[in-house]
Structure formats: C-alpha cells, structure tokens
Amino acid sequence: MKLRTLVITIAVLAALSIAAYLNDRPEAAPSDDPRVGKPLLGPDTAAQASGLVISDQGKKVELARNADGSWRVPSYFDMPADFDKISRFVQDLNEAKVDRFVTANPERLARLEFKDSSITLDDSAGREIWSVTLGKTPDQGNGRFIRFGSEPRAYFSSLHVWLDTDAKGWANAQLVSVKPEDVAKIEIPFDGGQEVVASRAKKDARWTAAETPAGQALIADQVASVLNSLTSLRFTDTVDPKDAAAAEAAAHMRTFRLTTFDGKTLSVAMGRKPEEKKLKAPVPDSKEGIAPIGKATDVKADAKPVAPEFETLPAGPVFAVVSSSDPHAAINELMKRRAFEVDDYTFTKLPQKPAELFEAAKKK
C-alpha cells in the first residue's frame, strides 16, 4: 500500500472513531440540575400519595391508601394490603439516589430500553404526582437507567427494586391480628367432642389446664406452640366462598378459640376433606368382559374369588375461617368475600389427641 493511501485510510478511521466517541459519550448535565445527588423519591412526595401503581412486562397492580393510613389492593378483591411490604418498597425508592444525568439525545434514549416498567404515585383525586420509568440495567455495575414521567431526559440511579405485579402478593396474608402475649385462654378441640382448655392469669404466667388427667401435667410449651401456630396463621391462596373444596372442608373443621385479656374472643377454624379409600371400578377383561351384577356366569369350582381393589383419594386443601366477637373487626367482613386456603403443615402439626398436651407429673 502506498504511503499516501495509508495516511488517508488512517485519517478516515480516526475521524470515524472521533464521531463514534462524540455520539456515545455521556452528556454534560446542566450545572443546576436539581435531581442529581438527591433521593429518587422524596419523603414529602411519598407522604402525599394515595395511590401506587406498579407496571412491568404488560402487567399492572394498583394499591390505594385509606383515610386511616392503611392500604388495600383494589385489584385483588379490595383486600387489605401488606403495609410492611409497601413500606419497604417506598424505603427503597427513598434511599436510592439519582447518581448522574445520562442523556437527552433521542437516539441514545431509544437504546436505554424504556418500555412499560414504571412506578407511579397518585394523589387522592387520582392525579399523577410522581412517576418514574425504568430502563435497562448497565452492562457493568448495579442500578437502572431511569426517566421521570414523560420527560425526554435519562438519568442513572443506584435503584435496586423488584417490580412485583402479582396483586395477591401485595395482599396482607396475615389472618389473625391477635398477638400470643395478649391471649389469656385457649380452647383446643379434638375428635369426639373432647377439648383441652388452658389459661393463665397474666402473659408471663404458666399455662394451666382446667381439667388435668390423674398423674399428668400440662405441657406448657405445647400449648405455646399451638398458640403461636394460630396467631401466625397466613393464607396461601383464596377462592370463591362457594368453591367445592372450601365447602367440603367446612364439614371437617376444628374450631380453636382464643380469649384475650380484655375479654374478646377469636375463633379459628381449620379443616379439609379427609383422605378417602374408594373401591376401584372393575376393569373389563379383554376376552370375557365383565358380567353384569346378578347375572350367572360359568366359573370353575376351584376358582379363587377376586380380591377387591381400592384406591386412595388424597385429602383436600386446608381452609381456615376466622371470626371475632368484636362486630367491628375487619376479619368478619373479609371472610364473606373469599375462602382462605392455608398451608397443610400449619394444620397437620397441631396436636391430634389430648394426650399430646400432657406428660407424667414430676414427683415433688
């Protein structure tokens, strides 16, 4: 290659490199940009919010704040929302910073993949007061490219947040609001109408049974274990109250009763359709077929009778029904909207016989 041609080629490549650099380099942010270095979401703005909308990958969940400060999930049967989960989510937005201005160039904005991943806060009238759209994550490091509202400007933030668009996931799954230390008496039912009633004079006193078998003593830790299971009861799913599985479970409920020190009573019923053994239907013989019942057939004198075969139908899902003696308790209304399925283990780990709550009394 001639020297002159080589020089021209190098000059052209250098020019292209400079053009590429100028096109891709970060743009200088205005010196008075008010967002850089500040929290992504200010606490004052968060305090004004009466609605939260989270969108991602074509899905959306809406949360609404009540007048008393509690939240609900309109898109999941208007159920109470998990306040702790909302608080953590908002805290993540408060703690994330706007690290730097990135670009206002339309071509560069298009490469940052701003689609439908967004978080929006509304006021009590449903008007948008704050919104941020999340773009792609950088090739290196943590965080997201972001843009506020519909502004044609992109920033980079250290934000790390999960956009959960499952409405059920935002509902408060806790079914019992009573705390273990508030319970003065617990009634534990068993088959055959048997029941163990344990009580205590104050929260740090030892549990005692109303009736204790001769030579036996109540196992206080067992009672505490039952109490903890009941007061930490959470649902895993909900169905229509007329659902067949829920209706079958209602016929096999065990109802526990908790009485608080202030005299209120909470009933916690749990049950499911039990496991069932069922006679298998006869399978037709490929040659002989099945003789109709009552019809004589030719059988050998020494033929052995065919043993009946059974199949086991598994137990149904466990459902819980909670009710309070307080007519104003929210749980009473909630139980009318849905039937609540709970984890099987919560039910199966409960004592099945009164004897499991007692042990031999220690000699003094």
Image: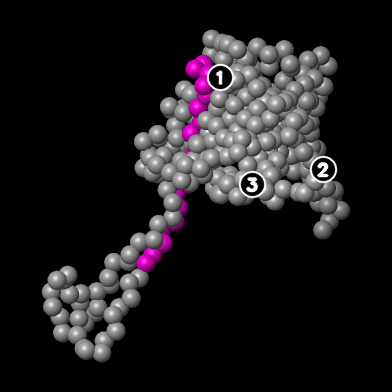
Between 198 and 362, the one lying in front of the other is 362
Amino acid type for the residue under numbered disc 1: Ala
How many other residues sit within 10 Å of disc 3, few (<14), some (14-19) or many (≥20)? few
Mark 1–mark 3 distance (CA, rounded to whole Å): 57 Å
Residue at numbered disc 3? 214
The colour scheme used here is one colour
Q: Residue at x 30, y 78 (%)?
A: 306
Left or right of 181: which side holds 288? left
- Return the disc, 2 or 1, that comes first in the chain's sequence: 2
Res 137 → quadrant: top right
Q: Is residue 299 above or below residue 48?
A: below
Residue at disc 3, secondary structure? loop
Q: Position of residue 235 (x, y in %)?
A: 55, 37
**Stretch in magenta:** 310-331
Q: Residue furthest right?
A: 3
- Label ID, residue 14: 2
Disc ID at residue 64: 1
- The residue shown at (69%, 35%) is 207
Does 124 sit left or right of 112 as displayed?
Answer: left
- Residue 251 located within the stretch drawn in magenta: no
Residue at coordinates 60% horizontally, 38% vertically from top-left? 211
Residue 206 vs residue 281, the one in the foreground: 206
Tag 2–tag 1 contact (CB < 8 Å): no
**Residue 271 pos. (x, y %):** 47, 43
Q: Residues within 10 Å of mark 2 (few under 14, many from 20)?
A: few
Q: Is residue 282 above or below residue 159?
A: below
User: Are there few (<14), some (14-19), or many (20+) residues within 10 Å of tag 1?
Assistant: many
Q: Residue at x 51, y 16 (%)?
A: 328
